[in-house]
Image (cartoon, rainbow, N blue to C red):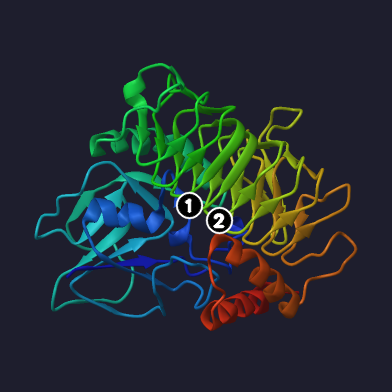
């Protein structure tokens, strides 16, 4: 069996805040799917490991992590900071590299050979997709990859549109797979396909606009939700536009959320609102510990790290970054809130407090905080805390 090895960058740097030090880039969501799943899909591999990322990170459905080192074949080593797209790749037996715009993004390791380091040697095959320069590019990937990802779901033979719902556009562009949809839901598919996976609930009074992908057992409880990917086990309410929910996140109340990325176990208090456009309509830059970074984007809301939480009525400026485990309380809010910040007074959540809160939160999604998960949470705190 050929193993897929997702190679993490040696030094991801501050461009990958707020996920740097929390979870590998391969575990982030580009379009409807995690990056490692995109690679496995186009290459047809079954076993996946992540190499060179954090040894421990808080997650409930992750690939095994291995230290950096030689990789014996048969294997395919791929870059985690590249999101592949398009049809399955047919590899010629002589192929040794995968390239995109003449840049090597993958290496084929036949049985009996050993890969030791990235290089540009050997015959290559092209692969579609896009490089990712930082966490903000998860939104760029969403814009470029989500329409085709949702369209692909139609080939799986979805259920018919539920009764007493209104469809604007072709009803054949609504893909329900065991979702429970109440009467009165509006599906607007004039801009793209809407996909609702197994166990999704959509309550009356919700308007959905495609392209939109909603992962298993998520619950949409009212509002307008457009052009987004919502990972598994999320709760969504209010106005949501062009957002990435990695999974297990809560936005259960009113408030505008635009062009934002939410890590696992993020919880947004009632009325939390993000700005996603500067008054100048200019490029958004991020103010991070390593300095100011240009994103190349005009629309960018907030990047929320895992286990981040906001108080009711929180107002976040364009291009804000909220670190993992931070509790956003107070005003005015800075555009960079460090991991585990407890309000704006210079206090920080200690590891015991972080674990105590996680033990209250995670079982609400039927996730037991095992000894392994607790150790992972403590290791995450040790890496990120001041």
Give the quadrant of the N terminus. bottom left
Please give left or right for residue 346 compared with residue 361 in the image: right
Question: From this viewpoint, is residue 297 visible?
Answer: no
Q: Quadrant of residue 347?
A: bottom right
Which residue in the rendered view is the most extreme toward the top? 169
* Disc assigned to residue 232: 1
- Toward the viewer: 41 or 197? 197
- Toward the viewer: 26 or 241? 241
Please give left or right for residue 214 compared with residue 240 in the image: left
Which residue position is annotated with label 2? 248
88 versus 184 height, above or below? below
- Toward the viewer: 363 or 308? 363
Report if the CB atoms under discs 2 and 1 are less than 8 Å apart. Answer: yes
Q: Residues within 10 Å of mark 1 (few under 14, many from 20)?
A: many
- Toward the viewer: 373 or 57? 373
Please give left or right for residue 372 compared with residue 285 in the image: left
Q: Residues within 10 Å of mark 2 (few under 14, many from 20)?
A: many
């Amino acid at each position: 069996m050929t193993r897929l090895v997702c190679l993490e960058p040696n030094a991801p740097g501050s461009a990958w805040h707020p996920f740097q030090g929390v979870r590998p880039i391969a575990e982030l969501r580009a379009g409807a799917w995690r990056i490692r799943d995109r690679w496995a899909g186009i290459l047809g591999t079954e076993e996946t490991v992540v190499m060179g990322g954090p040894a421990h990170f808080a997650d409930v459905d992750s690939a095994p992590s291995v230290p950096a080192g030689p990789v014996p074949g048969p294997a395919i080593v791929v870059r985690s900071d590249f999101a592949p797209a398009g049809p399955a790749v047919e590899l010629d037996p002589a192929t040794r590299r995968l390239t995109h715009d003449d840049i090597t993004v993958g290496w084929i390791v036949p049985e009996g050979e050993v890969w030791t380091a990235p290089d540009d040697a050997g015959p290559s095959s092209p692969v579609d997709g896009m490089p990712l320069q930082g966490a903000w590019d998860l939104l760029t990937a969403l814009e470029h990859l989500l329409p085709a990802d949702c369209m692909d779901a139609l080939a799986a033979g979805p259920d018919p549109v539920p009764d007493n719902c209104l469809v604007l556009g072709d009803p054949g562009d609504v893909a329900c797979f065991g979702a429970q949809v109440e009467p009165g839901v509006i599906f607007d598919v004039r801009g793209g396909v809407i996909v609702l996976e197994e166990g999704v609930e959509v309550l009356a009074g919700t308007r959905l606009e495609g392209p939109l992908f909603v992962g298993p057992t998520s619950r949409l409880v009212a509002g307008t939700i457009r052009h987004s990917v919502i990972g598994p086990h999320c709760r969504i309410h209010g106005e949501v536009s062009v957002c990435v929910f990695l999974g297990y996140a809560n936005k259960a109340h009113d408030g505008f959320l635009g062009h934002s990325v939410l890590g696992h176990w993020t919880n947004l208090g009632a009325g939390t609102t993000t700005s996603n456009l500067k008054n100048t309509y200019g490029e958004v830059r991020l103010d991070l510990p390593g300095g100011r970074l240009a994103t190349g984007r005009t629309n960018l809301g907030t990047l929320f790290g895992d286990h981040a939480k906001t108080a009711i009525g929180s107002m976040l400026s364009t291009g804000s970054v909220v670190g993992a485990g931070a509790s956003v309380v107070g005003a005015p809010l800075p555009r960079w809130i460090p991991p585990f910040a407890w309000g704006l007074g210079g206090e920080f959540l200690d590891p015991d407090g972080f674990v105590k809160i996680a033990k209250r939160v995670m079982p609400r999604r039927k996730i037991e905080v095992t000894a392994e998960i607790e150790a992972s949470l403590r290791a995450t705190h040790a890496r990120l805390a001041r």
